[in-house]
Image: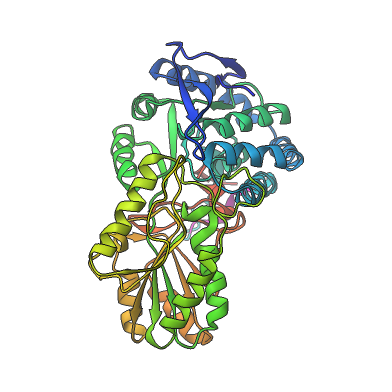
Amino acid sequence: MKTDLFIAGKWTEASSKERFDVVDPATGDVIAEVANGGEADAIAAVEAAAAAGPGWAATPARVRSEVLRKAFELMTERSGELAKLISLENGKALVDAKGEVTYAAEFFRWFAEEAVRAEGTIGSAPSGANRILVVRQPVGVCVLVTPWNFPAAMATRKIGPALAAGCTVILKPASDTPLTALAMAAILAEAGVPDGVVNVLPSRSSGKTVGAMLRDPRVRKLSFTGSTEVGRLLLAQAAENVVNTSMELGGNAPFVVFADADVDAAVDGAMIAKMRNGGEACTAANRFFVEEPVAEEFARKLSQRMAALVVGPGTDEGTQVGPLVNEDTVAKVDSLVKGALDGGAEAVTGGARPDGPGFYYPPTVLTGVPADAPILREEIFGPVAPIVTFTGEAEAVRLANDTEYGLVAYVYTQDLARGLRIGEAVEAGMVGLNRGLVSDPAAPFGGVKQSGIGREGGHEGLLEYLESKYIAVNW
């Protein structure tokens, strides 16, 4: 497959001729060398996107729609090979990778349909002096920065609405997983995306390359998915040129189980909310709050399910949990678990990093986790479920909201009124009520507090790439 930069419709070496290694998390072995884009390459990508911008913006919405529809079809046809590629460079189990490809392709289909729905409005001024005409126009050149945990879905969730709106883009993928992004560039070119409309810029120097693009006045949009710490830095940089921003940042999702819940259903939901992508997801259940009367039953049943999962190389068909993406990630998970155990928690299953090659960590359930444990404050990004007990609704809400983050929350109860009360009371942009999965291309995805700004998916996702222009007119 192609491993160079993709700029202006051409595969090209980095201007420095430098390349960097892509590693298989299952073994630590190098699987590819990819062109290492620098600041000069970043400006070349902006130049290409700016040059292609007027033509793509003027392209009829139906034509843009058909290009995205074709990209959906190509992804669907090649889902098997794309899944293997994701699993190889990311480490996730094939079953997760296949699910990601299906989910990722759906963003192209959804925004193919949304491309023809960038409607404006018309009304009359209250004074009667004039008509109020509002039209939607593409924001312009967009810089899209994506993480390693969903290398296909995070790209399509941004590229889809940007192209549907008539914008051109430069995609800066995570350096741990650039191969999937480059495969997406090839698919989009084959689908009929004109040269320069989509550019892909792998780079180990993320700060410098993204910073160079944000300083270019032709860039009018930044969409970033990643850590809150990096998001804050990018917001500051974007402010210098007043660049439109969308931020999908960190999460610390509470998973609340009330005593009246169907415990078996709650365990089923927990396995999805916690173990999707091996726990390496911003939506992953991070803190489990279980009402005292069912805490022991829930912990026992969850531990049995977690202990039964098959751990191994993601590319093996029988694997259910692959390695984590890199050494830093597995070391962080190990440190958080050790901190909880040192503070008095008990590992019902798992709890220690295995010996041997690869970045593995076993599915782990912790009980008796102290309230001040860092594992309850930080995003774990691994297959670890810390359980804390509570008594009553008020304490559940207090514990759920005791975090700077507010991306998603999960609530299990058979009392609909209670579920809706808690759903309104928790400080989160999304709530899964008796569901362990909330992500859907047709729904607005995003958080509150330190979890981000703006929404992706749904009609709201399209609006993130459009400006509203008001025209006062008489007739």
Q: Quarter of the image holding residue 18?
A: top left
Q: Nearer the viewer, residue 158 or 347?
A: 347
Indicate the position of residue 212 as horizontal and vertical percent values: 36, 24
Front in this rendered view, residue 269 or 242: 269
What is the number of callouts on the image? 0
Residue nearer the viewer, 137 or 266: 266
Task: Give above or below for 451 relative to 365.
Answer: above
Q: Quadrant of the N terminus?
A: top right
Against 71, residue 331 (above or below) is below
Identify the residue at horizontal 35%, vertical 41% (top origin).
328
Task: Kindly identify the residue that appears in the image at 38 percent across and 45 percent down.
Answer: 329
**Residue sitting at x 56%, y 60%:** 309
Residue 286 lies, in percent from the top left, at: 40, 62
The single residue placed furthest to the front in the displayed view is: 355
Examine the rendering and report whether any part of residue 279 can be seen.
yes
The answer to whether residue 171 is left or right of residue 105 is left
Q: Is residue 133 something one can see in this rendering?
A: no
Bounds of the magenta segment: 117-125
Would you say residue 433 sits in the magenta stretch? no
Reply above or below: 319 against 231. Answer: below
Q: Is residue 148 left or right of residue 103?
A: left
119 in magenta? yes
> Which of 333 and 153 lies nearest the eye of the viewer?
333
Q: Residue 360: give x, y in percent of width and height.
A: 46, 48
